Image: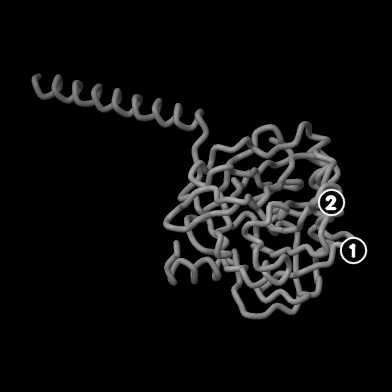
């Protein structure tokens, strides 16, 4: 267990996650971060999809390592007891705003998207999720927002985790309608592939837990679509715990350079000040 009761209580209070033993329906709003699961077998998808709302995507900007929720029961109901070794099981992590909505942190058409990790201990080093142009970002945001809106008030369908639902893939606008199994590059109409798969083996251990899949979460707004910012990393353990595994945002190389320059400048100023003080005292 990564978190303490105090940390988890703070997370719930912040609205990142709301735990519970039952769920009447999946509710969504613009800016929420949605994690979806479905199976892909060649050109076909399985009978069920599962989506859980992790809360406001912007809430993850200041989050540290902690357990969000255990979804083993829901994954077992939707995909069978062997879900952790089901190589067809696909995860999708996405969130965003439409053209008229902002929460004071995110501008319109901001996208939060996952980039899969091959090793849970290599978090923060995936290829950043981003669009290929401003028009691409706009189209992508519109489709992501549409997906979020379409999931609002979905019946729980047997899911027990709060704010989650097991949805048949025969339903209109389920996650597989936005993520064609064989048309890479057309996720949400256009844009980055925000999916990963559960491997037949694990992708490493972190804080004593074995992981089956993990994502870096990246954020890009419309004005800076080509400069996505690393947010945090999330992973799914073999026991169904959904965890934040990254301690803090990984600074970009330019950030390190600026930090080094600031340190050198501060040191130079201190030396000059000390030298000047010595000269003054000698007068």
Is label 1 in a helix, a strand or a loop? loop
Q: Is residue 142 visible?
A: no
Q: Which residue is nearer to you in this view: 200 or 183?
A: 200
**Residue 161's spot in the image, x, y percent?**
65, 73
Q: For residue 174, what is the image quadrant?
A: bottom right
Disc number for residue 178: 2
The residue positioned 85% from the left and 62% from the top of the image is: 169
Q: Which residue is nearer to you in this view: 8 or 51?
A: 51
**Residue 191's spot in the image, x, y percent?**
78, 39
Quarter of the picture containing the C terminus is: top left
- Neighbor class of circle 1 (other Cα within 10 Å; few <14, some 14-19, many 20+) is some
Circles 1 and 2: CB distance less than 8 Å?
no
Q: Report which residue position mark 1 lands on.
A: 170
Q: For residue 154, what is the image quadrant?
A: bottom right
**Residue 77's spot in the image, x, y percent?**
71, 72
Is label 2 in a helix, a strand or a loop? helix
Quarter of the picture containing the N terminus is: bottom left
């Amino acid at each position: 267990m990564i978190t303490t009761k105090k940390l988890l209580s703070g997370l719930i209070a912040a609205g990142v996650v709301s735990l519970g033993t039952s769920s009447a329906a999946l509710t969504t709003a613009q800016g929420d971060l949605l994690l979806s699961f479905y199976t892909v077998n060649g050109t076909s998808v399985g009978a069920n999809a599962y989506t859980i709302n992790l809360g406001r995507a912007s809430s993850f900007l200041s989050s540290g390592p902690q357990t969000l929720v255990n979804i083993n029961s829901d994954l077992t109901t939707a995909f069978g007891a062997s879900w952790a070794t089901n190589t067809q099981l696909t995860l999708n992590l996405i969130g965003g705003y439409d053209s008229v909505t902002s929460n004071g942190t995110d501008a319109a058409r901001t996208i939060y998207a996952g980039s899969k990790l091959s090793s849970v201990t290599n978090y923060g080093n995936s290829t950043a999720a981003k669009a290929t142009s401003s028009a691409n970002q706009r189209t992508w945001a519109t489709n992501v927002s549409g997906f979020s809106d379409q999931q609002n008030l979905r019946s729980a369908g047997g899911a027990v985790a709060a704010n989650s639902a097991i949805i048949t893939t025969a339903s209109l606008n389920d996650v597989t309608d936005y993520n064609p199994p064989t048309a890479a590059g057309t996720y949400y109409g256009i844009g980055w592939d925000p999916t990963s798969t559960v491997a037949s083996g694990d992708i490493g251990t972190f804080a004593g837990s074995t992981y089956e899949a993990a994502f870096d979460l990246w954020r890009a707004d419309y004005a800076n679509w080509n400069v996505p910012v690393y947010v945090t990393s999330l992973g799914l353990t073999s026991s169904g715990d959904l965890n934040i595994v990254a301690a803090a945002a990984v600074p970009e190389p330019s950030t390190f350079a600026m930090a080094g320059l600031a340190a050198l400048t501060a040191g130079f100023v201190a030396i000059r000040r000390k030298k000047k003080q010595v000269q003054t005292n000698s007068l």
